[in-house]
Image (cartoon, rainbow, N blue to C red):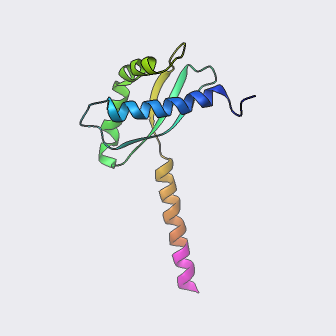
């Protein structure tokens, strides 16, 4: 038996291929620095949520709009690259986990600094 489900394997494959498509095939100069951080695929492999991290705050809204408008192009590229019966629908979602991690890191440093000043 395989160590994890088919939807997870498809998600990993989609993450790699979509990252390559966004970097090399999507030729929109308005796209900021984008990182595909993860992909969640439903168990029936019909819907996929692609989580993206965008470096600059000013570019987040426009880059997300560009990616969502390029969904059909990305799906057509995926159908050429992958040997699957059907390619899942794509939805791009802004990944807030990096920002959340930075916020937690700042709070921990602040607490650490307060602990040192009272000692």
Q: In this rendering, is residue 72 above or below 115?
A: above
Is residue 18 toward the left or the right of residue 107 in the image?
Answer: left
> How far across and how far down the image is residue 82, in percent?
49, 20
**Quadrant in which residue 118 is drawn:** bottom right
User: Residue drawn 62% across and 19% down?
Assistant: 44
Query: Was residue 79 drawn as part of the magenta stretch in this picture?
Result: no
Quadrant containing the C terminus in the rendered view: bottom right
Residue 116, position as x, y percentages in the image = 55, 82
State the residue in front, 25 or 39: 25
User: Residue at image x 42%, y 20%?
Assistant: 75
How many labels sit on residues?
Answer: 0
Left or right: 89 as drawn, with respect to 10? left
Residue 87 vertical position relative to residue 38 in the rendered view, above or below: above
Magenta-tinted stretch? 112-119
Asked if the stretch drawn in magenta spans residue 118, the answer is: yes
Outermost residue, top side: 85
Q: Position of residue 79 (x, y in %)?
A: 45, 17
25 on left or right of 95: left
Considering every residue shown, the one lying at the far right of the view is: 1
The residue lying toward the viewer, choosing from 9 and 50, is: 9
Residue reaching furthest to the left: 29
Q: Residue at x 26, y 32 (%)?
A: 28
Examine the residues drawn in magenta and state their main secondary structure.
Answer: helix
Q: Is residue 13 above or below residue 57?
A: above
């Amino acid at each position: 038996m395989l160590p994890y489900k088919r939807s997870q394997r498809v998600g990993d494959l989609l993450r790699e291929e979509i990252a390559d498509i966004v970097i090399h095939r999507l030729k929109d100069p308005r796209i900021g620095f984008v990182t595909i951080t993860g992909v969640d695929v439903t168990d029936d492999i019909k819907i996929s949520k692609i989580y993206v991290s965008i470096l600059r705050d000013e570019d987040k809204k426009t880059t997300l709009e560009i990616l969502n408008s390029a969904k059909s192009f990305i799906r057509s590229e995926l159908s050429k690259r992958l040997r699957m019966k059907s390619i899942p629908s794509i939805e791009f979602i802004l990944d807030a986990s990096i920002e959340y991690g930075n916020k937690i890191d700042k709070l921990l440093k602040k607490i650490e600094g307060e602990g040192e000043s009272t000692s």
